[in-house]
Amino acid sequence: PTLETTFYGHTYDNPFMNASGVHCMDVTELDELASSAAGSFVTKSATADGRKGNPEPRYVNLDLGSINSMGLPNLGLDYYLNYAILRQKSQPDAPFVMSVASYQGFDEYVDNMRQIQDSAYTGLVELNLSCPNVPGKPQMAYDFEDTKRLLTEIFKFYTKPFGVKLPPYFDMQHFDKIANVLNQFDLKFVNCINSIGNGLYIDETTDTVVIKPKGGFGGIGGEYVKPTALANVRALKQRLNPTIEVIGTGGILTGRDAYEHLLCGASMVQVGTQLQKEGVHVFERLTAELLAVLEEKGYQSIAEFKGKLGTLD
Ligand code: RRO
């Protein structure tokens, strides 16, 4: 069998990528991803100006996942845009994704997208509408009206391909509402899910929280979030225009986990917490494990089972 996967017009060796935020801060880390066994990769969410982020400790691995309140540390939009432009020139046959966020809110999102529009970079952009860790700032994608207003503003001038990174939703009505908004735009993909925002982990020996920012509240990733991630991939895939692809992120520790995201309809799958725990060699293990699942089930390719989750009625 083969793990080859087509995503927005390009065929990748396999569907695996890093999840934005993990191992993608600078050229060194990005180049390590590029030469790893991952099919593609995404850069750290960029804000207009570089940021140091929240005070440490701000990322902690847990038995069942991770908690973080990084606070958007990044080297600034110019840095990632320069990297993207150089890489697109030197490796035109190996597309990747550039993640863009905002620290200030609505206007900065628009300005950042305008800067990319005016640049030489023509590749995929992931607009992060779901950072849970900026004190005092809501997650854009939990406000359906503002999300619609923002996408309307961006589509007035932006002509290059892009998609959005979503937070998890927990109500059928919310799945309907966000899909209804997104279906009004020519988005190329949605990525489900960002971390489950504002969880709290307590250390049992010290009876304290484990990260410093926001009194210990932080985004939860890893094993904890897989059922929520799968539900969001499935729910969005069922509701979105067929032209909008879905990237599945959340709780991928094994090839089987990736297989389940693909069953729910994901085109690509991203690994955050487990990449942080294992390093870039995780992609060798995951590709081998996913290939073994296909062999065991008698599939020749991902296309044979993608989106074909069974139900009981
Ligand atoms: O940097 C972060 O604190 C962060 C971001 Br931008 C995000 O989108 N998701 C997350 O868990 N952390």
Image (spheres, rainbow, N blue to C red):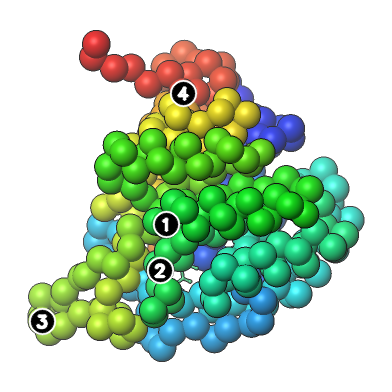
**In which quadrant of the rendered image does the N terminus lie?**
top right
Q: Is mark 4 within 8 Å of ligand 1?
A: no
Q: Which mark is residue 138?
A: 2
Q: Residue at x 51, y 46 (%)?
A: 191
Q: Is mark 1 within 8 Å of ligand 1?
A: no
Instruction: From the image, tell me which residue sits under label 1.
Output: 143
- Say which of marks 2 and 3 sits in front: 2
Q: Residue at x 47, y 61 (%)?
A: 140
Q: Residue at x 58, y 38 (%)?
A: 184
Label 2 secondary element: loop
The reply to whether callout 2 and callout 1 are in contact (CB within 8 Å) is yes
Q: In x, y percent, where is residue 253?
A: 38, 47
Q: Which is more N-terminal, label 1 or label 4?
A: 1
Structural crowding at the residue carrying mark 2, measured as other residues with C-alpha within 10 Å and reported as few (<14), some (14–19) or many (≥20): some
Instruction: From the image, tell me which residue sits under label 4.
Output: 307
- In the picture shown, does residue 32 fall above or below 161? below
Amino acid, disc 3: Asp
C-alpha distance separating marks 2 and 4: 32 Å
Q: Residue at x 27, y 74 (%)?
A: 217
C-alpha distance separating marks 3 and 1: 35 Å
Structural crowding at the residue carrying mark 4, measured as other residues with C-alpha within 10 Å and reported as few (<14), some (14–19) or many (≥20): many
Toward which corner of the image does residue 308 lie, by quadrant?
A: top left
